[in-house]
């Protein structure tokens, strides 16, 4: 990826953190030079000089830029590590505010819904599905069965698995496709399904094969189930899709529970 492409990508990501286009452009430009005047920033970014002052002023208020007042003024981006930490704190603060506001909004009255044991819900995107996986691990009371492909098993998920095991949750976990990740699992919870069993579950055991492969299967407390697959269309906006259900008699829960129960080693299958 070229420097210009990298810069464009960062500018787009900074906008996701609440910065406007000109602010993002100015910050990226300043991160590439020791310091610069408004004229120099304008030349680098094609942002009109009059708008540079407004953009940099906003960046200073956000703690991302320092200003040396003189004639002309000189601007400098804060250290990269400090900038990332500032953005992280701002983002977390906004998320916390959103969560608190949503929790305080009173529920809207609705008619009684149908039996939830017949419901199946969809969830898209690796980030959202991983968040649901981690929540199921954190909220399970008795046991969790999880088979997950290494491509969607990041260090944070392994930490959540370790946390579940540390509170004496009966946990059976198999990570498919990465030996180093498997070694990080607590020995008491890790198991290695034979290739034939993995094929039966829908996980890839060789290169190629189906375009829509299973990425994770999870059952929590015998009452909640999650099935996720890799998105078949490489041009799709989401990289992973899943279905989720809850209820001891829910058809999907029963199906996934039986699938995993038949594949787990006897010592893990309680």
Image (tube, rainbow, N blue to C red):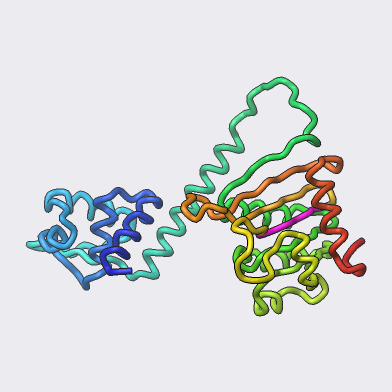
Q: Nearer the viewer, residue 251 or 99?
A: 251
Give the camera-side residue of 44 and 129. 129
As drawn, the residue found furthest toward the left would be 71
Reply yes or no: does residue 45 show up in magenta: no
Instruction: Estimate the x, y position of residue 7 in percent, counting from the top left.
Output: 29, 63
Which residue is pictured at 82% across the width and 54% down the height?
141
Q: Residue at x 54, y 55 (%)?
A: 239
The structure residue drawn at horizontal position 15% and vertical position 64%, both measured from the top left corner, is 74
Question: What is the span of residues highlighted in magenta in the rendered image?
Answer: 215-220
Left or right: where does residue 15 sit relative to residue 77? right
Q: Position of residue 224 (x, y in %)?
A: 78, 48
Task: Answer with the quarter of the image where residue 149 lies.
Answer: bottom right
How many labels sit on residues? 0
Q: Quadrant of residue 156?
A: bottom right
Residue found 79% across the figure and 53% down from its top: 220
Locate residue 199 relative to residue 106 in the image: left or right: right
Residue 174 at what x, y percent from top left? 75, 68
């Amino acid at each position: 990826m070229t420097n210009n492409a990298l810069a464009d990508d960062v500018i787009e990501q900074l906008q996701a953190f609440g910065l406007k286009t000109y602010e993002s452009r100015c910050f990226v430009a300043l991160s590439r030079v020791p310091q610069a005047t408004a004229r120099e920033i304008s030349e680098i970014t094609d942002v009109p000089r009059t708008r540079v002052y407004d953009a940099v002023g906003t960046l200073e208020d956000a703690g991302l830029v320092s200003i040396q007042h003189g004639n002309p003024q000189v601007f400098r981006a804060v250290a990269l590590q400090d900038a990332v930490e500032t953005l992280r704190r701002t983002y977390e603060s906004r998320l916390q505010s959103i969560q608190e506001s949503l929790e305080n909004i009173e529920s809207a009255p609705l008619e009684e819904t149908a039996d939830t044991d017949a419901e199946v819900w969809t969830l898209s995107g690796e980030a959202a599905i991983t968040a649901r996986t981690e929540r199921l691990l954190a909220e399970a009371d008795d046991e969790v069965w999880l088979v997950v492909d290494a491509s969607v098993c990041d260090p944070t998920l392994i930490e959540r698995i370790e946390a579940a095991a540390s509170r004496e949750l009966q946990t059976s976990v198999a990570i498919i496709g990465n030996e180093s990740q498997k070694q990080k699992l607590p020995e008491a919870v890790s198991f290695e399904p034979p290739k034939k069993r993995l094929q039966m579950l829908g996980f890839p055991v060789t290169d190629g094969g189906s375009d829509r492969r299973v990425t994770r299967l999870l059952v929590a407390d015998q009452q909640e189930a999650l099935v996720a697959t890799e998105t078949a269309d490489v041009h799709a906006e989401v990289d992973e899709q899943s279905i989720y259900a809850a209820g001891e008699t829910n058809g999907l829960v029963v199906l996934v529970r039986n699938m995993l129960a038949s594949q787990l080693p006897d010592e893990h299958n309680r």
